[in-house]
Image (tube, coloured by chain):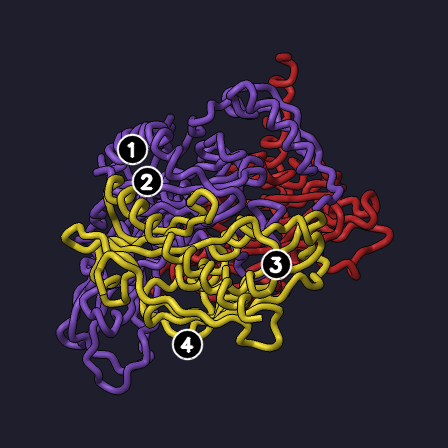
Chain colours: A yellow, B red, C purple
Amino acid sequence: MEESQIREISCEQSVLSKPDGSSDFSQGDSSVMVGVYGPADVKQNKEILDRATIEVIFKPKIGLPGVREKAMEKMISNTCQAIILTTMHPRSSITIVVQVVQDAGSLLSCCINAVCLALMDAGISMKCMVAAVSCAISEDGEVILDPTLKVAQVASSVMHFAFESKEKDVILSSTQGMCSPDQYLSCLASCQEASDKIFTFYRTSAERRFSKT
Amino acid sequence: MSGLELLSDQGFRLDGRRPRELRKIECKMGVFQQANGSAYIEQGNTKALATVYGPHEVTGNRSKIEHDKVLINCQYSMATFSTGERRSRSTGDRKSQEMQLHLKKTFEAAILTQLYPRSQIDIYVQILQADGGNYSACVNAATLAIIDAGIPMKDFVCASTAGFVSDTPIADISYLEESQGGPELVVALLPKSDQIVEFQVNSRLHLDNFEKVLDMAIKGCKDVHAVLTRVVKDHVGQLASKMSKT
Amino acid sequence: MISCSWYPTKLLLLNDDIKIRVSSSCNKYSFCHFSKFKKENIRPDGRELGEFRATLLNVGTINTAHGSALVKLGNTTILCGVKGEFAAPPVNEPKKGYLVPNVELPPLCSSQFKVGPPSEQAQVVSQLIDDIVRSSNLINLESLNIAEGVVLSGGESVYFFCVGTGVAPGFACCWGATKLPERGPKALSKLSWVLHCDMICLDYDGNIVDASLIALLAALKNVLLPAVRIDEDTGRAVTSQEGSIPLKLSCQPVATSFVVFDDTILLADPTKEEEGLATGAVTVVVNEEGDICSVHKPGKEGALYLPRKFMTASGDVSRDLRKLDSWLRKHWRVVKDDVPTGAYDLD
């Protein structure tokens, strides 16, 4: 596997029977399962009068959810708010449950991609699709896309980006470690290019799924 | 720690005060913009701040709405770095809840509650540094904050503590003096009418000495009242002069 | 959410420290109100689009904490207190200590926060500060290591007594005790410091992240940990105030938060109202050399105009960052000059 490519992606939709939409997404060895319920009833204290309320629950593989998981939930929730047409479902709730099955690097990207597919499966109206790509800058300044856990631990910086499908604008950017502004912009550019692969994957998997019937 | 003498032969306490002297009080009103009323007080090394929100619609438990008076909601919180040993929980433990209840009862007696039926007033108090007299600092700060918020009260509520060491009543005890295990009297007073709103005694105090210690505490409250009145007058004077500039 | 709440409106003069303030609770009204200001390229509080609010810093006010700092970024007030405790170092890295940041948004800072467990926003900001501290290697965790080979018999308390002077007439004593972890009989264990950095927001008027980071840095620079010596006879750790050393920070990250309106306008240092009305937000953390420690853009409606406008706006961003950086350098020089307490006006 070349270092400048993202890992093998595979996905299965409608794997769970109870949620309105679900997906089981793997990116290399990282694997995440997402269930989406919605639009459904919302508690009165959480309801918003003119749009849907988006709730995200992030469950780590082991242990109880803590502060780190809360931060992940907020990021996924904000990303969804940017792409879902929430004004189509006022005073309703869209609940997204993310369960980590295996974490082998680039977990946040894996989750966001899985969430996008699950939302598609649930038939929730969205403005556009979202694709997330992670990358790491190794100690000698090399840009490595979709880093594994081992690579991420020794890297000088790890970044996650999420792009929307229309004009590849950045919806989410989160970085760890230090880098120079030029390195940041070059990583951004490489991740944008790599997101094409994910958007193509969405399209082909949808075509394959709906051409059967 | 038992080697420390709380009252020396010359009549000086550990921090150089005389028995009747209060610690230095510095306070400021209207320190925060978000709250309707706020105040900050320093009594010696004890630093407390209070913010008041309201009167506003009752949030939270709607079953607590009172049809004829305002609901007073207090929260007492100590910063984790406020004491010598770090506190793991800033609020929610027994001591905080007890303090909250005392504060609530104190201010229910002082605020004209019948003016705002079906409404709620929130009083939040935060201790930034604790060196004895936490409750009194809270009450004094909250009084100023309520005045800053423009909520009518019957009178100022001034609180002070008193202790008893070597047959001498001492006013405004600090943390070291408290922790020695001697009696501690906490009094919250409405100064003009000399009415006691809150009264608490810890440890043993003989009835013979009781009057003396209580008088000392009441005198402490009246001294605090003099300070608070001056602060309020200064603050109002400043506001008035600024408004008159237009 | 439209709720009818009435606040007494404080109408005060436009003066050095007091501005006209009218509170409104309806979002739609505020948005139109805002748009009028946008047309004139000025913000409701009179600032330009890229201008930061006046900042005040007060260091070393809390004597019970090992280090403290109070920051006022406009009206946003954050107090940071740092307290050191003993702890066993992490199992996989026995030569390191801990730095634990925690941001508290109590109900006293704003009516939007309720009594109860930490709100989501508090947790998210705490996590962000923790990530920034890790990313920037703010402090060399190995410098927090005390010793190896301290004899513990489990559940013991280590008392340290230090006397500080100069605060009040006479002396102000602070003493502390900390419980060491259960280890089993006569286990030889390592000891290191854990620095608990608690940032309490006292007044919430937007831009918590920037203010918290400034408060954290100032408080850490103010920290004086007592010197620890292992008593040979008992094998216990004994602290004393003499020989206390200040902490050494390896870099000084500065956070700059922006909000986006309608994908076209970038406002620096947003107030609470601006944050509520914005369509997007981004925080950039830069250290003195200009290296990026963190770019945090947590989604939100409307894709941010990175990278297209970032290229053009990078001029603005880096200009602001350089302004902030030089501001902070001036300020750090002041703090470094051994002035233990004081209030500084920074503009």
Viewer-side label of 4, 2: 4
- Measure how far apart labels 3 and 2 are at the Cα level: 40 Å
Q: Mark 2 = which residue? A: C254
**Residues indicated by labels 1 and 2 sit on the same polypeptide chain:** yes
**Residues indicated by labels 4 and 3 sit on the same polypeptide chain:** yes
Viewer-side label of 4, 1: 4
Q: Is residue A197 visible?
A: yes
The numbered mark at residue C325 is 1
Q: Mark 4 = which residue? A: A62
Q: Is residue B65 left or right of residue B53?
A: right
Q: Quadrant of the C terminus of chain B?
A: top right
Q: Is residue A148 above or below residue B195?
A: below
The numbered mark at residue A7 is none
Chain containing mark 3: A
How would you rate the neighbour count of disc 4 (Cα within 10 Å): few for under 14, some for 14-19, many for 20 or more? few
- The quadrant in which residue B147 appears is top right
The numbered mark at residue A124 is 3
